[in-house]
């Protein structure tokens, strides 16, 4: 049974509150869980301490037992100093979508043009060989 520490959505429509829970990875997001470890309220300002409440001792115990935190929970734990989050590197993310799409199209054209150019050069080379053969005979 693989365990995850993740967020389960609670609250009403357009007023989310997330419970940080330990659950089986196969359980539904808002469904069955083993233990509640804390609460996250994204509607509160970032300066307020009530925005995130975690029982860090329970979190550490579950991580020792093999529970893997989700990406968002790992950010919380990194900020609390419990676990170290490895930074991600996606240099494409900083480029606007239109520019990425144009760059991909250019690359596709260049990749498509290279075999076509090689294909066009091969018949021209064969045509050049035929007159040379005719002149030799």
Image: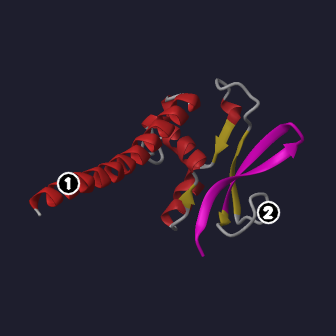
Question: Which residue of the protein is positioned furthest toward the bottom in this rendering?
Answer: 1
User: Secondary structure beneath disc 2?
Assistant: loop
Relative to residue 7, is residue 85 drawn left or right?
Answer: left
The magenta-colored residue range is 1-22
Q: Is residue 89 visible?
A: no
Residue for point 70% across, 66% down: 34
Camera-side residue of 122 and 74: 122
Side of 92 relative to 76 (left or right) = left
Task: Estimate the x, y position of residue 6 in percent, counting from the top left.
Answer: 65, 54
- Tally of numbered tags: 2
- Crowd rating for badge 2 (residues with CA inside 10 Å; few <14, some 14–19, many 20+): few
Q: Is residue 94 magenta?
A: no
Foreground of the two, 69 or 118: 118
Could you tell whether 58 is left or right of 93 in the image? right
Q: Residue at x 52, y 68 (%)?
A: 65
Question: Do we see residue 100 in this rendering?
Answer: yes
Residue 18 sits inside the magenta stretch? yes
Image coords of residue 117 (percent x, y): 35, 46
Res 131 label: 1
Apparent side of residue 133 relative to residue 110 in the rendered image (left or right): left
Tell me the residue at 13%/56% (across/down). 135
Q: Secondary structure at mark 1?
A: helix
Identify which residue is drawn at 65% across, 26% down. 46
Q: Which residue is mark 2?
A: 31
In the rendered image, the quadrant that contains the C terminus is: bottom left
| Nearest-to-viewer mark from 1 and 2 | 1
Colour setup of the view? secondary structure
Q: Is residue 52 above or below residue 112?
A: above
Quadrant in the picture for residue 88: top left
């Amino acid at each position: 049974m693989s365990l995850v520490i993740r967020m389960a959505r609670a609250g009403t429509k357009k007023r989310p509150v997330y419970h940080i829970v330990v659950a089986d990875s196969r359980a539904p997001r808002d469904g069955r869980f083993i233990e509640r470890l804390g609460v996250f309220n994204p509607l509160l300002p970032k300066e307020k301490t009530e925005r995130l409440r975690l029982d860090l001792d329970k979190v550490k115990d579950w991580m020792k037992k093999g529970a893997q935190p989700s990406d968002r929970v790992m950010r919380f734990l990194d900020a609390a100093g419990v676990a170290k989050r490895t930074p991600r590197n996606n240099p494409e993310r900083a480029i606007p979508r239109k520019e990425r799409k144009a760059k991909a199209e250019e690359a596709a054209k260049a990749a498509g043009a290279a075999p076509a150019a090689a294909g066009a050069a091969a018949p021209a080379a064969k045509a050049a060989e035929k007159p040379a053969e005719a002149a030799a005979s």
